Image: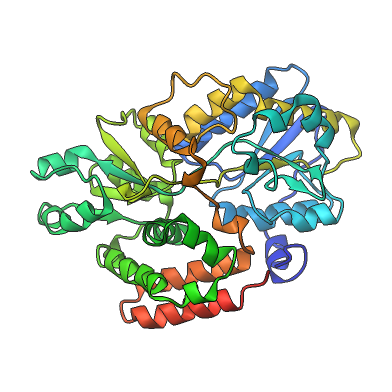
Amino acid sequence: MSFINGRLLGAAAGIVMFAGPAAAADCEVVHWWTSGGEAAAVAEFAKALDATGEHKWVDGAIGGSGDTARPIIISRITGGQPPCATQFNPGKDADDLIDAGLLLDLSDLAKEEGWTDFVYPSTQLDPTCVRDGKVWCVPVNIHSAYWMWVNRKVYQDAGIDVPATWDDVIASTSTLRDNGIIPLSLAQGWPVSTLSDAIEVSVLGIPNFVKIYQDRDMDLVKGDLSRAVWEKLDEARKLVDSAEIVPQWNDAVGLVITGKAGTNVMGDWAQGEFAVAEQVAGDDYECLAGLGLNDVVSTGGDVFYFPKTDDPEITKAQLKLASLMISAPVQVAFNLKKGSMPIRQDVDLNAANACMKKGLAILANADNIVPNNTQMMQRETVYAIRDLRNEFFTNPDMSVDEAFEQFISLIESAPE
């Protein structure tokens, strides 16, 4: 789907508030990191740029999520009011902007600094930031969505073992309910798909997950294994009372941190919230990759693009910020706060907590890496599947067979 024309851009245009003229060395950076852990992390980027003494970080945070921010960002760029830099996720979201010649080519900087020598896995640079042989963005982290977060004390107080797998969570549901604890916290919207993806990968395995979303293997899409995913999702939705679903992902993580819920399935950015709450991995909480069923990490994360400008001072600030974001010291400082993994392995991570070290060990084996679904298909199909899953979780009258048939139809009609 093109994000440059059509309904999405039109809807965004009505809510854009354009920034005023910037001073020569100001660099307005638009992003959607507004939770406690996210704000602490992005402050490391701002600190690094301000420390140059040449350029000033101007924070352009947009509340909500990437779904809210992306159309606003694209509308500003196409409308002639671009920021200095902007966050996106790995995927196809910026392709139309690149094709329209609206983004800064970072190829010379990437070559000069040898990005291909240290970015790991290499797919975080190419194809994530490469189009038509040129580098258009800087990858800043690896975020894996497939983690389960467990409050240890909740289970210990209930007199049951701390879960080591998703199956343990299912088995302990009634005991937690008897103790007034929510077994599984959940937020509305995209977090439902985060949970669903984690379950899907655990059922299918990585090769079959890729065959469905990248290769569109319709025999597999229509088969018993694919249907088993929806049976597992049905099992998961029975853990959740729709009245307990909260508005934002960090609200759901907060329920685990405060002991009101036993578990939450969320990306490793949840670590930032645990860090702000001064909780310690392995003591206060557990982090289970792949729901404790398989060692997997996904190659999601965040990248930054730099819209073209006629102002040479802004261009200098853009190149300096890109260089800083991928530099070793800033990579360490940012990712320790964000809870994500750095995109370079030639850095000192002695200060990393147990969860980050676990993720890095899993990442070291390429067979454990799962592509993000937005790297394998257009976002419009990803959103349609997300809507289906949300309806399935909130509508108990929707049967497994009904949801499964709609899923098949969405994959069949997905654009290449």
Quadrant of the rendered image containing residue 160: top left
Image quarter of the C terminus? bottom right
Front-most of residues 375 and 179: 375
Image quarter of the N terminus? bottom right
Asked if residue 39 is positioned above or below residue 373 in the image, the reply reads above
Going 49% across and 66% down the picture, which residue do you hit?
A: 386
Which residue is at the far left?
Answer: 159
Front-most of residues 14 and 317: 317
Q: How is the image coloured?
A: rainbow
Expressed as whole percent of the image width and height from the top left, the position of residue 147 reads 38, 46
Asked if residue 72 is positioned above or below residue 295 in the image, the reply reads below
- On the question of residue 182 being in view, the answer is no
Quick check: 149 left or right of 325? left
Expressed as whole percent of the image width and height from the top left, the position of residue 267 reads 44, 46
Expressed as whole percent of the image width and height from the top left, the position of residue 407 reads 48, 76
Asked if residue 113 is positioned above or below residue 270 in the image, the reply reads above
Going 39% across and 44% down the picture, which residue do you hit?
A: 295
- On the question of residue 125 being in view, the answer is yes
Going 31% across and 28% down the picture, which residue do you hit?
A: 280
Going 55% across and 42% down the picture, which residue do you hit?
A: 33
Quadrant of the rendered image containing residue 232: bottom left
Q: How many marks?
A: 0
Front-most of residues 15 and 175: 175
